[in-house]
Amino acid sequence: MRLPRLLRFAIPAVLVAALPLRAAEPEFRLVNEAGLPAAKVKALGPVFTGLGQRVYALLGTSDPGPVEALLTREVDIGYYHQGRIWLPADTDDADLRETWVHELAHHATGQDSSFLMKEGVASYTVEALWREDGRALPEGWPQYGQRLDAWVALFAARGQLLPLDSYFALPGYQGGVDGDFRSWQAYVVGGSFVGWLLREHGIAAFRLAFERGQPRDLQALEKAWRADIATARWPAFDPAEYLPARPRYQRYVQRLAAAGAER
C-alpha cells in the first residue's frame, strides 16, 4: 500500500468496465465505483495495461492471476488485498498511475513476505519505471522527489541508518513518533536494497529472498549494498526542501537535522 492504515468500506458487486487482454498483458477489471466520467475511465485502461506489462516484466512475473482495480472515494490512499486494488478517485492522473504501479507490484509478487521486502519492491518498481520514462520522481510517499538511494545515503550521513535486521524485524507499519519515522524509512531502505538486489543478483535471487522474507546471506549483501551507496557519493541535500510542511514530516526533518548536528 502507498501508506498503511486500517480501512472499512463496502465492496460493490457491479463491474462497469472489463478489459479483454492478450496473454502478455495484466488481466484486470477496472471498477468505477466513484462515478468518474466514462471517458476518463476508458482512457485509464490502456495506461494501466501498459504500465502493468512493464511491472510484470521488471519483476519476472508470468502468471499472477486476475486483479480488480476499484476506483473509489472510500479511501484516500492506495491499498492491495487478495487480488483487489483500491485506488483513491479524488486524486490526479499522475498519482493514480503511481498508486496503480505500487499496488500492482504487490499483486505481481504476492503478499507472503516481510514488510520490508513487500513495501521495498513496490517503492522500487515505481521509481524504476519513472526513471525509464524520464519522469520526475514521485513527490509523494516515500521518495518525496529524491532517489531512494539518495535518502539512504542521507540516513547514513546523519547516523539514522539502522542495520537491515532492524528493518526486517518490523512486522508492519508502526505508530507513534519513532515507529512512524522508522516505517517511512523501511519503505525507502527496502526500495533501495531491493533495487540493488535485482540489479546486482537478478530476478531469481530476489524471488528466493522474497519467499524467505529476507536473503540467507543478509550480512554479506548488506555490506555490499552499503558500499555501493557510499561509492556513489550521493550529493547531500536538505530534507526540509523535499518533505511536506506538515507536522509528521517536519518531525522527520527535525530528527534528521538533530542527528546531523550531533555528528
Image (tube, rainbow, N blue to C red):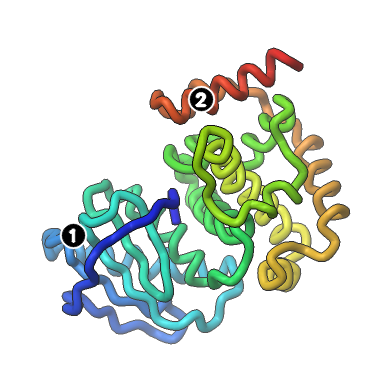
The residue sitting at 51% across, 72% down in the picture is: 108
Q: Quadrant of residue 217?
A: bottom right
Q: CA distance from mark 2 to mark 1?
A: 38 Å
Q: Amino acid at mark 2?
A: Arg
Relative to 256, is 73 above or below? below
Task: From the viewer's perspective, tell me whether residue 138 is left or right of residue 85.
Answer: right
Element type where label 1 sits in the image: helix
Numbered label attached to residue 251: 2
The residue sitting at 22% across, 68% down in the picture is: 10
Task: From the viewer's perspective, tell me whether residue 110 is left or right of residue 92.
Answer: right
Q: Residues within 10 Å of mark 2 (few under 14, many from 20)?
A: some
Which residue is situated farthest in the bottom direction here?
A: 23
Percent x, y of residue 123: 54, 52
Q: Residues within 10 Å of mark 1 (few under 14, many from 20)?
A: few
Q: Amino acid at mark 1?
A: Lys
The residue sitting at 79% across, 35% down in the picture is: 230
Percent x, y of residue 43: 23, 63
Numbered label attached to residue 40: 1
